[in-house]
Image (cartoon, rainbow, N blue to C red):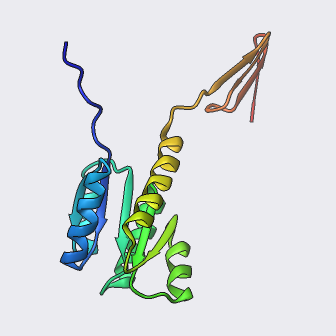
């Protein structure tokens, strides 16, 4: 009897430096991700709409405004964990990245152990948000449908 392995989680990597993109991609693949890597924010936008991602990594790179805008667009649509990467160690970069919706921030050169730790932490956070949540809570003759915002006592319904 063959048991299928669960599908690998998808990661989207936006990195304009080909050497860094390859290094990060290989590390993510070793961690068990299927990595979809692109070099421009426009490619990232197109790629993001094609599949569901468990993690997004965005390098501010040569086009920081486009990268920040891509981050804002993702955050408007999704709760997927986002890690921002930059070469600059300026506080303003960190503020901009977090203000755009990033969940965490890394500076280059990236220590592989730190990348692994941050990716693992954000992936776990993202998985917990995607976990199905119980929406109907009951106790004796009381019930609360969290998704529908309905509260029942016996057969009487109260909504807000």
Residue 149, x across and y down, in percent: 68, 32
The one of 66 and 60 positioned closer to us in this rendering:
60
Residue drawn 55% across the image and 75% down it: 99
Res 77 seen here: yes
The one of 130 and 145 positioned closer to us in this rendering:
130
Res 79 seen here: no
Residue 67, x across and y down, in percent: 36, 76
Residue drawn 52% across the image and 49% down it: 125
Q: Is residue 8 left or right of residue 109?
A: left
Residue drawn 37% across the image and 60% down it: 56
Q: Is 62 placed above or below 39 here?
A: below
Question: Quadrant location of the N terminus?
Answer: top left
How many numbered markers are drawn?
A: 0
Question: Quadrant location of the C terminus?
Answer: top right
Residue drawn 53% across the image and 80% down it: 94
The one of 2 and 83 positioned closer to us in this rendering:
2
């Amino acid at each position: 009897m063959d048991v299928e392995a669960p599908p690998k989680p998808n990661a989207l990597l936006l990195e304009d430096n080909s050497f860094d993109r390859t290094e990060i991609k290989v590390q993510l693949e070793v961690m068990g991700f299927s990595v979809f890597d692109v070099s421009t924010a426009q490619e990232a936008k197109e790629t993001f709409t094609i599949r569901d991602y468990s993690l997004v990594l965005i390098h501010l790179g040569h086009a920081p405004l486009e990268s920040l805008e891509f981050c804002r667009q993702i955050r408007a649509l999704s709760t997927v964990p986002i890690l921002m990467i930059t070469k600059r160690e300026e506080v303003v970069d960190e503020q901009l990245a977090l203000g755009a919706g990033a969940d965490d921030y890394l500076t280059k050169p990236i220590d592989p152990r730190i990348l692994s730790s941050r990716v693992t932490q954000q992936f776990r956070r993202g998985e917990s948000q995607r976990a199905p949540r119980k929406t109907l809570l009951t106790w004796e003759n009381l019930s609360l449908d969290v998704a529908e915002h309905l509260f029942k006592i016996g057969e009487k319904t109260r909504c807000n």
